[in-house]
Amino acid sequence: MIMETNNKYIIKIIATWMIDELIVFSKHTKVDIILLQKQEEFFNEGLERLKIKNLKTYTKPFSTKHLLKKLGVVIPFFFKNLFRFRIDYNMVIGLNAIFTFLKLDLSLFSKESNIHAQFASQSAIISLLIKKYYRNEPKYSFTFHAYDIYFESKWFSKLVEQCHKAFSISEFNINYVTNKYLSSKKIVLARLGVFTEEMKPFNKEKDEVLTLGIMSWFVKKKGVEYLLEALNILKEKGYFNVKLILAGDGPLKEKYLKYINKKKLESFVDYIGSVDGKTKINFYNSLDVFILPSISLPNDQDGIPVVLMESIAYGLPIISTDVSGIPEICINKYNGFLLEEKNTNEIVNSIISLIENREQLDNFSKNSLELSKKYDIEINSKEKMKAMGWI
């Protein structure tokens, strides 16, 4: 039975996995979703799904009411945390949080509110300000992921100290923040996940061509350039029985397509653009192996990419890199190959190994399915809700 609650979920920029998490939440409780900005049209369908699930969504719920009382919270907060407003990203998220808080319709909250924020940045700071506004009575928790902890955050320790729970998406992140910021019993593991029951493995008919796939937002940290370089080396070595299906979009798309054309890799690479729904299912079912050669950048790297969770749920072997929490989902020689980042030769050798020893694929596939049990969003989201006190 769904009970009436005062649960609030604060988001600046929504993502597909957040929509999935909220769909699971809707099975157990009611939630008000506070969107701090208008979302991209790409997510309209997902937001409609949330409305169907009877979840209330408020987009930019701003009000000028009680401005003086808000200033009474903000001014002492600013001066007590002055050192956190140094001229860098700490200042950006701090000031953005303050300005958004001053505009926010606080009638959506109360002393009984139980708030959850995504990312240890603007949304979490706003949650802390709401707590201060209501004399420290509301509880808030937040989930931290990647960029929000990898920069030199002056906010993280304070957010943890004041929160009910701080959820990490990986064991790597827990170790990272413990060593860099603080150790706290409030920091707990809450893995993300996918709807594994909906992702039925497809027994692709084996042929002579090894079909690799990558689905990504094309930015530098995804390491796509190293994969394309590896394909070029394979071509030069005479391995013509390999193909890459390249799915996605992003700022580096044209650069990659130009490289493919320049190196005459058109017969090795099929670029299919962005995929979703049935086309995404078809994408996964056409693959022998999913590959994601992520790299770490200053202040930014992947957490545990959702595409890897989806891949193992489809029973795919994966090739990825030793970055952040990826070794928790790509276990070397268990369900694929875990490589050194930016190492094109290791990418080449791992692909050659699978071309020449195709029997490895069956074992890797079986182990991926076993590992996917850790990334079941139904189980993980329900456990998270219990820790938050929402059920």
Image (tube, helix red, strand yellow):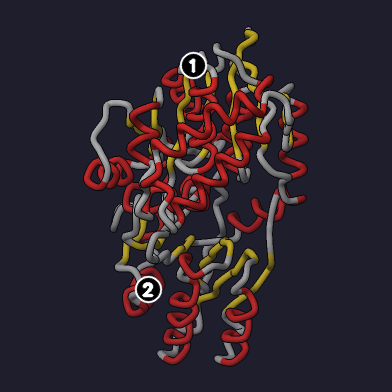
Query: Can you identify the residue that label 1 sits on?
Result: 135
Type of residue at label 2? Ile
**Can you see residue 330?**
no
* Coordinates of residue 351 in the picture (x, y in percent): 40, 72
* Coordinates of residue 304 in the picture (x, y in percent): 43, 49
Alpha carbon of mark 1 to alpha carbon of mark 2: how far? 55 Å
Q: Is residue 59 left or right of residue 317?
A: right
Query: Can you identify the residue that label 2 sits on?
Result: 347
Q: How many marks can you see?
A: 2
* Coordinates of residue 61 in the picture (x, y in percent): 73, 32
Residue occupying the point 73% across, 36% down: 59
SS at badge 2: helix
Residue occupying the point 59% across, 74% down: 252
Q: Is residue 239 left or right of residue 264?
A: left
Q: Is residue 3 left or right of residue 206?
A: right
Classify mark 1: residues with Cα within 10 Å, few (<14), some (14-19) or many (20+). Answer: few
Q: Look at the numbered discs 1 and 2 and tell me whether their residues touch, using CB distance below 8 Å.
A: no
Classify mark 2: residues with Cα within 10 Å, few (<14), some (14-19) or many (20+). Answer: many
- Most foreground residue, 355 or 154: 154
State which quadrant residue 360 falls in. Answer: bottom left
**Can you see residue 213?**
yes
* Coordinates of residue 186 in the picture (x, y in percent): 32, 26
Q: Can you tell which mark lies on residue 287?
A: none
- Most foreground residue, 358 or 263: 263
Q: Earlier in the sequence, mark 1 or mark 2?
A: 1
